[in-house]
Every structure is written in structure tokens, then in C-alpha cells.
Amino acid sequence: MNRRWTLASSVAGAVVVALDGTVLTVAQPRLQRELGASFAQVQWTSSAYLVAVASLLVFAGRLGDRYGHRRLFAYGMLGFGAASAGIGLAPGVGWVVGLRAVQGVFGALLQPATLGMLRAAYPADRLAAPLAVRTVAIGLAAAAGPLLGGALVTGLGWRAVFFVNVLPALAFGLPALLRPDRCRADGRAPLDLPGAVLLAVTLGCLVHALGSRPASVAGIAVALVSAAVLVRHERRTANPLLPSEVLGSRTVAAALALLVAVSAALFGTLFVATYVLQRRLGLDPLHSALRSLPLAVLMVLSAALCPVLLRRFGARGTTTAATMAVALGVLVLSGATAAPALGCGFGLLGAGFGTVMTAATHAVVRRADVAVAGVAGGLQQTALNVGPALGVAAATALMHAGTGTALFALAGVAALGVPAARALPGAAGVTSLTRPADLRVPEGVPERR
């Protein structure tokens, strides 16, 4: 497959996942009523997916590094579509919850592959533009998701939102399956299955604990213990799941920390802002969505502009300014009630997050060799799963002190990302070399597929 088809496939996979999450939120009230489900069961239609996908992202990326990202993309896309069709035909809420977990497994196969394919197809110094296109598409999907979901649920019922995934899954999954990767990374080294299990327990427990209302202290404790065991295991094993060339990179670690901090601030703010708009200001869901529309618009525009900013100011300058924009946007929203102030706050959030997401993802994937691009992509996706869960948990815990206090604290969370942004390369690090020594393609692994 050529680069254009690889980019189209990567965008399609990212958009399918982004749309699925946004349209489900709109469909849940109708699903609950028609299936006679409890609130806890409805919550599990989201939690089952999130726990499954967060647990397996990094291991799925490692599988892609070993067996080919295009192959894993095909399995993930087709499995995601099949699980979606099954949910659309589910006779009860138990089936929906179970199939959502299955959907999460295939989503975990799919998401790192969308980044791994790009890293394999494009030289490291030309990754910014395709990653920007991917981020723009995600922003458009996030903006269109509630509108599309609302139209489908109103006209055809909640099951229709899942059947939407079937056609793109077939359109992009089948060609990838019929033309798998011709070359792959060295498959002789054994997979680190104990490390995969420990990481799955750590992330699964953490996401589930943070997603519980209130947050589960026991779940967080189990996650911390398993994380400690994981670190000990990874230091001793000969073939670790988390290779040192990825986790040992100062740039990768800083970019992942930045993604966690900024996504936590964004999603925590959106959680609080929903209550402000609908309860304090008395707006209906449609008018609330219109007030927040500048977020999606500025996210798309900033992602498109990000490659230019990276060339001019480097990752350090670009992400530092963008992180400060996110923090400022949260502060504006903490005291906003009029439409112009709300639009300004949401616009700053969108501009900052779109820039950070593109630039930090570029930093993670660009620094990874082709042979470990899947693990790098899995770590990036994991950060974007843990961050929102952490942000919403923090917002929930702080809501009793008032929405203004909660938003002020979330602005502080965003500000915590500034030191991480300052650890990223400056403009000289981006432009001085087109092929740094740590980006050489391993022998026997072609850069173009």
C-alpha cells in the first residue's frame, strides 16, 4: 500500500474509534429505556470498553511491531466492525456490555497500528503533516459525533449508531488483510507475556478505579502494587515489553506526561462545564453544544497549523505556549457566563489541545525506531486514555467545593504540563538533522511498505 492509502487507513481507523465514543454518549439514554437497563449497567457499556482497550494498547502495539502493523490494523478494523454489528443486534444489555469489551479488544489492536503504519510509511522528518491530518480528522469526528448520533438515534434508534462502523471497517480492513506487510520486525525474540499481564492489570485497574463514582481506593492500590511488580520485572527480563529505547527517552517520557496532564485538564473541564451550562445557566443539550463549538473548530485549525509551528519554534516552544493556552482557557471558563467569554474559553482549550496532541504525538512516534513504533503508539494512546479518566475523577472529587474551585484546580493540572513541555526538543533539534542517529531504521526493516 502506498503512503496515501496508509494515511487514509490511519485516519479512518482513528475516526471510527472517535465517532464510536461520541455517538454512544448520545445513544445511552434510549438504550437504557428500550433494554430496561439500570444506570450501573449503562455505565458499564462505557467502562467495559475503556478497561479492555486501556489494558491491551501497549501489548497490541508490540504485536504490531512483531507481526506487522497493517495486519494488526486489518484484524482490529474487521473485529471492531463485527463487534459493532453484534451490539446493534444485541437482545439485552448484558450482551451489549460483553460485546463492548470485545470491541475494546479490537480497538486496542487498531489504535497503535494507525500510528505504527504512519511511522513505517513516512520518514521521521516528514511525520508532522500526516499526524496533523489525523488529528484534524479526530477533531472533526468529535464535533460531528453528537450531531450524527442525535440524528441516527432520533430517526432510526440507538442500534443504528453501531451499524455505522460496519462499512468503513470492511472498506479499509479487507484491503489491509489482503495485502499484509511484506516485511516485519524480528520475530525471534519471545513476547513478554508476564509483562503484558502485569501492564494490563495495572492499566485496567487504574482506569476502572478512576472511572468509578467515587474513585475506588482499592483499585488504585492494586494498580500501584502491580505497577511496582511490573517495573521490577521489566528491569530483569531479557526481552521487556517496554523497551528501554522508548521509555528511556527523555523526549518520549516528557511527551507522554504532557499528554496525560493536558488531556486530564481538558476532559475534567468538559465534565464540569456540562454542569455549568445545563444546570447553572439552564441551557438545553443543543445550546450547550453550540456554546462549546469553538473548541472543536479551534482544535481542527490548530492541528492543521501545528506542522508550521513545529518547524518554526520546535516542539518545546510550540507545546509550552499551547499548554499555557489550555490552562488559560480553563481559567476563563471558571468565571464565564456570557456567550463571548464561554466561546473564548472553549476556543483556547481547543487551540491548545489540538496543538499539544499533534506535537506530543509527533515527538513520541518520531523518536521511536520503526521496530518499536507500535509500542510507542500504544503508549501514546494509553496516555490519552489515562489522562481523561484522571481528569474526570479529579473533577468529580472537587465538584462539592464548587465548579469555580474545580476549574481552578484543573487549570493547575494543565500547568503541570509546562515542565514536561520544556523538556521537549527546541527548534534546533527539529531542523538541524533530518535523520538523527537514534532514528536509523534497523537493518532488514524497510522504511516504506
Image (spheres, helix red, strand yellow):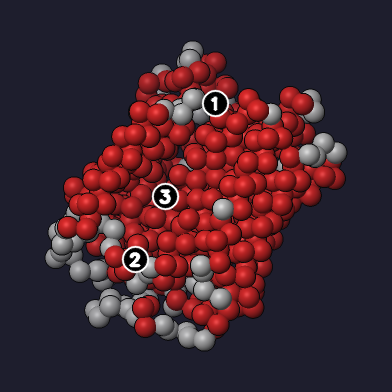
Q: List x then y, in percent, for residue 234.
A: 23, 55
Q: Position of residue 123 (x, y in %)?
A: 44, 78
Whether residue 225 sits left or right of residue 25 in the image: it is left
Query: Which residue in the protein does label 3 denote?
Result: 382
Left or right placement of residue 201 versus residue 357 in this view? left
Of callouts 2 and 3, which one flags the residue occurring earlier in the amino acid sequence? 2
Instruction: Quarter of the image for the N terminus: give it.
Output: bottom left
Distance between the alpha carbons at the discs numbered 1 and 3? 25 Å
Instruction: Check disc 1 and report the residue beneath it.
Output: 28
Judging depth in this view, the residue of 407 and 147 nearest the camera is 407
Q: Are marks 2 and 3 in contact (CB under 8 Å)?
A: no
Amino acid tagged 2: Gly
- Estimate how packed mark 2 is, as few (under 14), some (14 to 19) or many (20 or more) residues with alpha carbons within 10 Å: few
Identity of the residue drawn at 59% across and 39% down: 268
Q: Which residue is drawn at 58% across and 59% down?
A: 418
**Label located before the other in sequence (1 or 3):** 1
Residue in the foreground of this view, choosing between 272 and 165 = 272
Distance between mark 2 and mark 3 Cα atoms? 17 Å
| Quadrant of image for the C terminus | bottom left
- Label annotation for residue 242: none
Q: In which quarter of the image is residue 73?
A: bottom left
Q: Name the residue under label 2.
A: 248
Where 337 sits versus 282, above or below? below
When the figure is inspected, residue 148 is found, relative to residue 430, above or below; the finding is above
Numbered-mark total: 3
Q: Distance between the residues labelled 2 and 1?
A: 42 Å
Q: Can residue 173 be seen in this view?
A: no
Disc with the residue nearer the chain's start (2 vs 1): 1
